[in-house]
Image (cartoon, grey):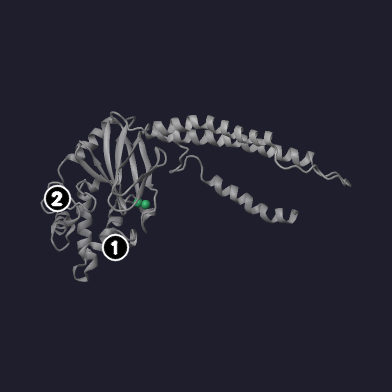
Amino acid sequence: MFNTIKKFLPILLSLLFVIACGGFDGPQSTFDTHGPVAKEQADLFYLILWAGMVVLVAVELAIIYIYIKYRRKKNSTRVPSQTHGNTKLEIMWTILPAIFLAIVSVPVLSAIWTIGALPKNPDVVVNVHGHQYWFEFKYQDLDVVTANELHIPVGKKILINLYSNNVLHSFWIPKIAGKTDIIPNQGNYMWIQGDDVGMYYGQCAEFCGESHALMRFRVIVDTDEDFRAWISHQKSEAFVPNDPLEKSGYDIFMSSKAGCGGCHMINGSKKAKGKIGPNLTHFGSRQHMAACILENNQVNLRNWIRNPDMIKPGNIMSGQAAVYMDPNKSLTESEVIALASYLQSLK
Ligand code: CUA
């Protein structure tokens, strides 16, 4: 017995160590809440946890008490009374948990109704489209379309409509709101509110293909003023470069050889009107790229344009764009550099 304990003790202790490593304020901790939805969910978690602890302790104490009190005495040959069933006890252990669950159901149902309610007058409405593997954000009534970085004003109710025309995804911002599934060909919705200015991690939380784990996003909670400035900037016309390198990137982007415009939109351009890939009108204003798995800089962008499948396996661009499918149309290194500098000029 003691040998077995000795054997497993280090494993048990290291397990505790691993759990403790998570911390309560990690980038994706659901305990470090920054909005009413996440807070309601965390509060509920704690309530159920402590209620469960009370039951656990009571049951374990009863087991220990009975184990000691009714154990066989030394040298005793007495056989315990043999009974089958005990109506009183059975009624008691059916009714007690029922009462307990009834009490717990009050805060649970109230939280479900609060979180599940459709906000009556949301301050901002965003239609979120789940793609393989990135998120598209369309601001309803504001005429803004962007990808992977969701800006919202602080302290305001945001209605999020969720759509997918491909597979299941799930929208999750651990510090602001729990997961809500995005169901193909059937709308779903949730509401969120960010109570503190800052940048928050989000990610797809439903397995959606080989790059599911690389389908991330950020929520940027702005002051009212910053949010308005961001919206008006996003509505502004796309930058048309004069710099020779950026200009040559622009020409490649708009050419039929590269065919970027078949899938990507640059607002106002006649040649880039695609809707399959992310809208790139203000790509350079985003801090991250490739669904927020990389910082948006020249090195990462060139690597991405060179070989997107290396960075995000199974993405549609590397599987469908002629420059990756047809060896005769492959981008040269100078074309890659020009494209990257044009894309980053799109502030
Ligand atoms: Cu989208 Cu997982």
Reply above or below: 126 against 301: above
Tell me the amino acid under the disc marked 1. Asn
**Circle 1 residues within 10 Å: few <14, some 14–19, many ≥20:** some
Q: Considering the numbered disc 1 on the image, is that residue within a helix, a strand or a loop?
A: loop
View extreme (right): residue: 75
Q: Which residue is mark 2?
A: 241
Mark 2 residue's CB less than 8 Å from ligand 1: no
Residue 32 shows up from this direction: yes
**Which one is earlier in the sequence, the residue at label 2 or at label 1?**
2
Residue 233 figure quarter:
top left
Percent x, y of residue 307? 29, 63
View extreme (left): residue: 270
Quarter of the figure with the N terminus? bottom right
Mark 1 residue's CB less than 8 Å from ligand 1: no
Reply above or below: 106 against 166: above
> On residue 82, which mark appears?
none
In the image, taking residue 100 as reference, residue 40 lies left or right, namely left
Residue 334 figure quarter:
bottom left
Tell me the amino acid under the disc marked 2. Pro
Of badges 2 and 1, the one in the foreground is: 1
For this rendering, which residue is in front, 135 or 53?
Answer: 53
Q: Which residue is mark 1?
A: 307
Q: Considering the numbered disc 2 on the image, is that residue within a helix, a strand or a loop?
A: loop
Quarter of the figure with the C terminus? top left
Residue sitting at x 42%, y 36%? 38
Percent x, y of residue 162? 30, 43
